[in-house]
């Protein structure tokens, strides 16, 4: 529609500026203005497959044939590991069964919104290097689903979980077909196959290992595009810090993938360190993001059941932010404490979250110039979603006591804690390893025991 309007305006303009005596018909050239949302189509086999795969999925939904499809789902934070693992396994499921009597139709679902993918610059860079389409148009994201997850989960064939151990509550209606994860086993999908849990740096390691094992066992190998191989290596590289923190399993899988890639002549450690360096630089490029985007770029949340009918199921959400709270406050319009909490409240109102936790981290230099990582925990409970004021007070105190009692954290009140409002608390601690993987179970356990 917009293109036709532009062409019409161009024709009118051409007619208006024509000389009166000039009876020669003018050739109206198409406008060079690109329509909103225009994309640059990716090149290469991987982008072509991903785009076609998404199209087939949506066509089948329109025809009422969603039951043919398997969702391969990463976690809702949408990091590079989740994305690469989901795309790899979906590609493998389709191609490894294509010439069998029971071909599988599988699609990678990125459990974040399309625009949120670019809040992780390392994702943008990795996809660009893999020659994918601009605007992530050849990927399926959560906001592009044609039905809500609760409804769709009852229609699809099933889900495969990668980089998380249990499905979000909204997918509870879908059978769990397989799980690949490097976090704690939560006993979900006990009959899933394969069901792989292991202590590795990257979940993509586990997916790529299984993919290569099954690929090499086929009578004839399917085509493995170099763009996907490079995406796999990037995910392993950034999570293992260029193999410096890799397990032997990470290293072996990376070596197998490298041999199949266009980098097969290169030294493994050199290539992986190079990938880690460029992706790490990209990952740090978040200075321009505002508070709302910092909150949602690495957001994980779900419903948590409580033990008593007096204490309802609540929504619990976690964000991870690479800035101190003081630094974030300076990013707000008024550069004041109240403004940060107002922006946070607007975000959690949108997500319907009862209890939110922001996990901040930053580095400071000591008197000798040595850098130390400082972490912060920001706890907020609100009473306008599922719980009333009395329940909010009780829940806040329950979680606050659990955090303060935990010896691994050894938290201290933030230097401006006395200025905080009702059901707000901020702590600092110096346990460098106590990120979300440590803090989330502490808080979830407290919520699940709240009575």
Image (cartoon, rainbow, N blue to C red):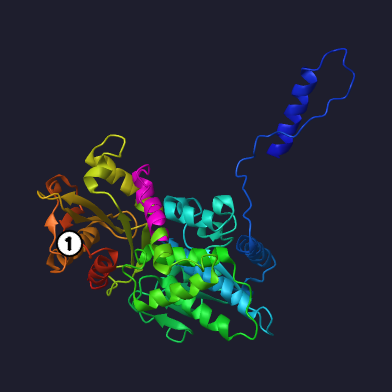
Q: Which residues are magenta?
A: 275-294
Q: Is residue 329 visible?
A: yes
Residue sitting at x 80%, y 21%: 15
Q: Is residue 279 left or right of residue 320?
A: right
Residue sitting at x 40%, y 63%: 270
Predominant SS of the magenta segment: helix
Above or below: residue 6 compared with residue 122 = above
- 385 or 365, which lies in front? 365
Q: Is residue 405 left or right of residue 223?
A: left
Where's the C terminus, which quadrant? bottom left
Per the image, the residue denoted by label 1 is 400
Tag 1 secondary structure: helix
Above or below: residue 174 compared with residue 356 = below
Horizontal and vertical percent position of residue 431:
18, 63
Residue sitting at x 35%, y 79%: 185
- 299 or 288, which lies in front? 288
| Magenta region includes residue 351 | no
- 129 or 25, which lies in front? 129
């Amino acid at each position: 529609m917009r293109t036709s309007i532009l062409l019409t305006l161009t024709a009118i303009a051409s007619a208006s500026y024509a000389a009166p005596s000039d009876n020669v018909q003018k050739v109206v050239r198409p406008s060079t203005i690109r329509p909103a949302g225009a994309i640059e189509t990716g090149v290469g086999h991987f982008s072509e497959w991903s785009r076609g795969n998404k199209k087939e999925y949506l066509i089948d939904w329109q025809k009422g044939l969603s039951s043919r499809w398997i969702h391969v789902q990463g976690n809702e934070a949408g990091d590079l590991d989740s994305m690469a693992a989901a795309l790899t396994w979906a590609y493998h499921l389709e191609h490894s069964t294509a010439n069998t009597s029971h071909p599988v139709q599988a699609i990678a679902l990125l459990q974040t919104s399309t625009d949120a993918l670019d809040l992780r610059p390392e994702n943008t860079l990795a996809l660009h290097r893999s020659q994918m389409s601009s605007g992530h148009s050849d990927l399926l994201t959560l906001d592009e689903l044609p039905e809500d997850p609760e409804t769709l989960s009852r229609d699809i064939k099933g889900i495969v979980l990668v980089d998380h151990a249990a499905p979000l509550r909204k997918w509870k209606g879908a059978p769990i077909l397989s799980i690949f994860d490097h976090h704690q086993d939560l006993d979900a999908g006990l009959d899933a196959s394969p069901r792989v849990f292991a202590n590795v740096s990257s979940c993509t390691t586990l997916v790529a290992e299984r993919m290569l094992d099954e690929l090499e066992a086929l009578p004839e190998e399917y085509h493995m595009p170099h763009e996907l191989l490079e995406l796999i290596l990037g995910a392993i590289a950034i999570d293992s810090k260029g193999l410096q923190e890799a397990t032997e399993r990470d290293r072996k899988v990376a070596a197998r993938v490298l041999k199949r890639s266009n980098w097969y002549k290169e030294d493994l450690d050199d290539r992986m360190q190079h990938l880690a360096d460029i992706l790490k630089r990209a990952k740090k490029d978040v200075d321009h993001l505002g508070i709302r985007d910092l909150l949602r770029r690495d957001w994980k949340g779900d419903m948590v059941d409580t033990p008593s009918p007096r204490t309802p199921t609540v929504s619990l959400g976690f964000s991870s932010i690479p800035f101190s709270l003081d630094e974030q406050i300076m990013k707000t319009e008024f550069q004041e404490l109240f403004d940060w909490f107002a922006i946070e409240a607007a975000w959690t109102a949108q997500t319907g979250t009862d209890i939110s936790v922001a996990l901040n981290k930053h580095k400071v230099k000591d008197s000798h110039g040595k850098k130390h990582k400082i972490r912060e925990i920001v706890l907020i409970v609100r009473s306008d979603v599922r719980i009333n004021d009395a329940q909010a007070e009780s829940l806040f105190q329950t979680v606050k006591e659990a955090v303060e009692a935990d010896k691994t954290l050894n938290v201290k009140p933030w230097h401006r804690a006395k200025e905080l409002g009702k059901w707000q608390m901020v702590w600092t601690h110096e346990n460098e390893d106590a990120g979300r993987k440590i803090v989330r179970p502490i808080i979830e356990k407290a919520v699940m025991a709240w009575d």
